[in-house]
Amino acid sequence: MDTQTKIGRIDLKGAEITFKAPKGGKIEALAPTNLVIEAGSFISLIGPSGCGKSTLLNAVGGFVPLTAGTIELDGEPVTGINPDVGVVFQQYALFPWFTALGNVMFALKRFKTSKEDRLERAYAALKEVGLEGREKTYPGQLSGGMRQRVALARVFVTSPKVLLMDEPFGALDAQTRVAMHEILLRIWEAHRTTVLFVTHDVDEALILSDRAHIMSAGPGRIIETMDVTQERPRHVDNIGPDFLKARNHIIRLLRQPSAEDH
Amino acid sequence: MLEAFKKVGQLVLSLSGVVVIWSLFANSGFISQNLFPTPGQVWRAAINLYQDGVLMSDLHISLTRAAIGFSIGASLGILLGLLTARVKIVSIALEPFLNLLRPIPAIALVPVAIVWFGIGEGSKYFVIAYTVFLAVWLNTHAGASEVASTYIRAARSLGASRTREFFEVIIPASAPAIFVGLRLGAALAFLSLVAAELSGASAGIGFRLQDARQFIRTDRMFVGLIQLGILGALLDAAFAYTGRRLVHWENA
């Protein structure tokens, strides 16, 4: 491992999040969790809704404060929203009043470099996601997949230490989703940013990540961790017995809580 | 293109229908033509007023009043709306007061305005600005309060300062609601303009209506009413058009 991949390590130490319930009680959205996310790795969080996967992601992003414990990014405690942590939301996070280029430029504005330099970087970022020639287009005129490509360009252009993705491809159709996986992995391999990827799609998690954490609700917690060792590139149309075994195992795990309910 | 033709056709058809029915009714003898003039009489009254020069000067005076009152009210409304929606201390200080102002109709302010600003232009600006302000403030406030939290999270996680967040996110995100307020405000500006001109003015469309009453000139009154109708409709269309242009992403 070279030194570059040492940036972007996340440490959760007893991180716990409780919300006030409407009737005065407390909801434990995330039970005390210890977790180490290695710098440069691609990590998925899978689980049913209410399992705390988005809460965990939002806590790393500094959007939701912890009730107890700490989260550290490269040894520094996370205390709030931090531009070193990039976020790709499920939808509506592009600014519709700016063009694709304007959206990417928005992210670059905090750097006090010349406008020419920022423009050059913005054009390069849009080219990297395959949107050359679409720079002056408004998000409303782009397809769902293209919008998320702009979102990827906007977040990768500043080379964040960590990238948080909350079901970013959930609203896309199957073919577009496969194309987005390829683009995401290509850019990730070029930048080697730590990625924390929330999904409820088991295949998506197994195709993308180095390691998947399976979560369960009531209280939200990690119930199992699974390393995905299969070589990349991985494709849904070319899956081996290991992939199937892992997939079946995770799906069985995810089915258990609802079985207990009956 | 075909759409535009259809719209113009519909307009011509609807208006000629109204004129025909109006003409039949006025000529039927049920009602004295002094009380309900024919389209021809109204047209001649309009020509007369035009030749006297009052038609255009009234129009100019009324439009100037509406424009100045609107500008004052709209700028204050946008400014305060953004502040009451996004700055806690301003909202605590002003919201209850503004909510008390809301039910007070503009007409009720005319006597106060005349005492404060005299019978001249000042009182007109005040009454119009007040009406426009409330409409614009209310809509701006609603729009700026409901800016999607994803936009704000995205802006902050992309390292935008609070100032940039305000100008590059909050304001454009509220723009559609601000335009609704401005369009409503423009319509209301005409309402309060006439209210202000009916009592205590020496020129303007509202004054001309009141003046015609002294001589029971219903034909002239109709000219004034039609003027107000056409002006209002044109203005509304202009606002709708500009709004669609400026807030282009809303209809994308």
Image: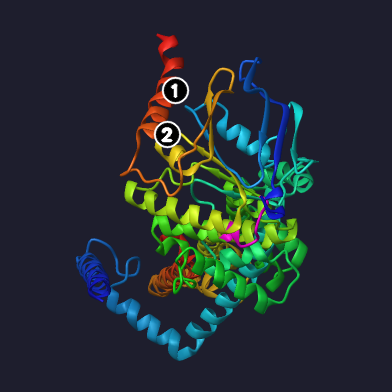
Is residue A203 something that shows in the picture? yes
Q: Position of residue B97 (x, y in %)?
A: 73, 44
Residue A160 falls inside the magenta stretch = yes
Q: Quadrant of the C terminus of chain B?
A: bottom left
Q: Is residue A15 above or below residue A62?
A: above
Residue at 32% over, 43% down? A238
Residue A202 image label: 2
Residue A19 falls inside the magenta stretch = no
Between A17 and B164, the residue placed more toward the observer is A17
Residue at 56% over, 59% down? A190
Residue at 43% over, 60% down? A146
For the record, the magenta segment spans A154-161
Subunit of label 1 = A
Where, by quadrant of the figure, is residue B232 drawn? bottom left
Is residue B147 something that shows in the picture? no
Circle 2 SS class:
helix
Circle 1 SS class:
helix
Q: Which residue is mark 1?
A: A254
Q: Is residue A168 above or below residue B13?
A: above
Q: Are marks 1 and 2 in contact (CB under 8 Å)?
A: yes
- Left or right, A186 with reference to A109: left
Q: Earlier in the sequence, mark 1 or mark 2?
A: 2
- Left or right, B219 with reference to B178: left
Q: Position of residue B70 (x, y in %)?
A: 61, 67
The amino acid beneath tag 1 is Leu
The amino acid beneath tag 2 is Val
Residue at the extreme bottom of the image, as rendered = B51
Q: Position of residue B139 (x, y in %)?
A: 57, 53
